[in-house]
Amino acid sequence: MAYDKFTILKSSAVPLPIENVDTDQIIPARFLKATKREGFGDNLFRDWRYNGDDTPKQDFVLNNPIYSGKILVGGRNFGSGSSREHAAWAIYDYGFRCVVSSFFADIFKGNSLNIGILPVQVSAEFLDKIFQAIEADPKAELEVNLPEQTITIVPTGEKESFDINGYKKHNMMNGFDDIDYLQAMKSEIKEFEAERIY
Amino acid sequence: MSNQASTLFDKVWDAHVVRKIEDGPDVFFIDRHFIHEVTSPVAFLGLESRNIGVMYPERTFATADHNTPTINQHLPVADPLSANQLKALETNSAKYGISHWGLGHARNGIVHVVGPENGITLPGMTIVCGDSHTSTHGAFGAIAFGIGTSEVEMVLSSQCIMQPKPKKMRVNVNGKLGKGVTPKDVTLYIISKLTTAGATGYFVEYAGDVFENMSMEGRMTVCNMSIEMGARGGMIAPDETTFAYINGREQAPKGEKWDKALAYWKTLKTDEGAVFDKEYNFDAADIEPMITYGTNPGMGQGITKAIPTSDQVEGGKSTYDKSLNYMGFHENESMLGKKIDYVFIGSCTNGRIEDFRAFASIVKGRKKADNVTAWIVPGSHIVEAQIKEEGILDILTDAGFELRQPGCSACLAMNDDKIPAGKYAVSTSNRNFEGRQGPGARTLLASPLVAAAAAVTGVVTDPRTLL
Ligand code: SF4
């Protein structure tokens, strides 16, 4: 599915300083019954965001109007658990284009890159600095520069670089996906398949 | 070919690389692809919108499991959304010529139970599915892992995905397991030591005599849980136990093909002197029956121990407090004697025949506790039939339990099998995340023996006292 190209993103951020945020929290299983990729953002963090009677939980960050932006900043080991890509869809559909954490679970990271969300892994110290900057000013902006692979806390100017492989970076910057790539090498795959023992 | 010592993982991985992309992932060939109703519909929509087809439909297998009812499966599915997903799986499979074991099919069941029991899963294969517990199939010496829906679309359309090669870890457990200590306890123990993110970025090989002496069912339980410490997957070198399990299964190779396959499978082991990026050693004698007390599978310990204080565990205090608060537990409390409302035995972790045998061994001659609601859910129709044939059903019935029909059930609570808010469930499944078994549900992960002990006593009980 096509997604927005990613180059430089400058935005305020939503802080979620909780560790081990698993994909069951990002989108609970009972909201996985759709057969289309639509509307998952409404149920992003459903059980942290709403009470059983669907009234908003006032103390949850997404219900606090002071915080907004296209960047979600999470605690260590973000996105663990289930492989459901719906978790990444919900984050994208809600309006986030980038998730920052000091550590990501593997499958979540891969799913995010596949659908156009940039996972930015920073050091634990830098993550703390980001949380502090947002605490000091909820409108504090972060600048994520994909071509240069850097993230900057705009009000303080503090900067850190992050890793991403060249192939994925190229894809993100151009809005390409892996399926285009694989379709272009089908004859090579056919030759390989013919040699398989199973 | 170099004659450098290599690992089981390297041997299987390297044999499946179609192309290496410089500063990028490997184009990785997939031998077997399982799909189910929840994570596949959007992938099929993607194929349609791009106007591309399924490249090798005979390499994909569909089964309905995540969203199916576990009672009255002969009736139409009441929830229209669930019914719609099941229908989509059926229609898509028919359209592209994919084998489909839908609700009511004699071979239907949880994807990670039916793959092995029908001989679809074989050593040396690469296997993926849009479900993170695909790691289960690693018990056969396959590289098996969970993928997202975009990757499901890739496999359907090109039989390949793009994967950076993970690092390698080996976990050795040697010695003799004590009485009442099962494969589930071994894996919960390892995860408690490594923590929920301790193996992120790695592919794990399990080695040592504890795994060598384990049944295939037990090995599947261990490999299944690999993802719960962040690993992409886990695997165990195939041996005589593996070959004996596969031989004669419906889709397993036969005759000459079997001989050829067997010769290859015997080469699938880590060479002496091969190097891992990380290695752990554990002693079987240190492992007790385990139980979890928190909201991730790494928050587990021996059943006789008290709940740790926040400074005894890794990670931040506020996250730890949030977790205990959700569970309604306090630091230093004993787990033994805690009152239980629900018991769930089933899932791709512990929904195989051996698990029901273990459950029955404790339940036999006892009665279900009045305060406990028990959901006993076989992993497949084949397991269900075995439960009946072996007389386990009679033991369960005499003790006041009912057997349900196969499916994922309360493992992820997508169907009606939801633990109510605030209630405590001892569960043989794999995740104790907040709300995993229903909004507000509180899950204690454990083995089938611990589940049985809780089911007959109504409280957390050391199963060794009942054996
Ligand atoms: S039983 Fe649970 S973990 Fe296993 S396949 Fe079903 S939902 Fe996934």
Image: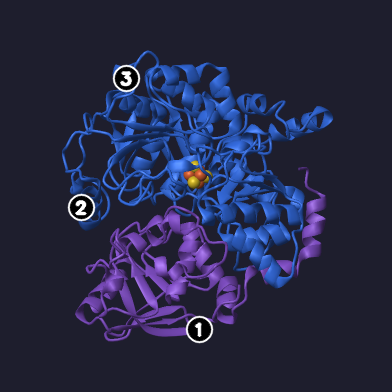
What residue did someone put label 2 on?
B321
Q: Identify by letter the chain in blue.
A: B
Asked if residue B388 lies left or right of residue A143, the reply is right
Q: Measured from the top left, where is residue B422 in percent x and y? A: 26, 46
Asked if residue A61 lies left or right of residue B266, the reply is left
Q: Amino acid at mark 3?
A: Arg
Q: Is residue B245 visible?
A: yes
Q: Secondary structure at mark 3?
A: helix
- Badge 1 and badge 3 in a common chain: no
Q: Measured from the top left, where is residue B48 in percent x and y? A: 70, 68
Q: Which mark is residue A7?
A: 1
Tags 1 and 3 touching, CB below 8 Å:
no
Q: Identify by letter the chain in purple.
A: A
- Badge 2 and badge 1 in a common chain: no
Q: Is residue A181 visible?
A: no
The verdict on label 1 being within 8 Å of ligand 1 is no
Residue at 54% of width from left, 81% of height from top?
Answer: A4
What residue did someone put label 3 on?
B464
Q: State the separation of the CA atoms marked 2 and 1.
A: 39 Å
Residue at 63% of width from left, 53% of height from top?
Answer: B87
Instruction: Check the residue under mark 1 and report the chain it is in.
Output: A
Q: Secondary structure at mark 2?
A: helix
State which quarter of the image contains the N terminus of chain A: bottom right
State which quarter of the image contains the C terminus of chain A: top right
Residue at 40% of width from left, 23% of height from top?
Answer: B177
Q: Secondary structure at mark 1?
A: loop
Q: State the separation of the CA atoms marked 3 and 2.
A: 31 Å
Instruction: Check the residue under mark 2 and report the chain it is in.
Output: B
Q: Which mark is residue B431?
A: none
Q: Measured from the top left, where is residue B408 in percent x and y? A: 50, 42
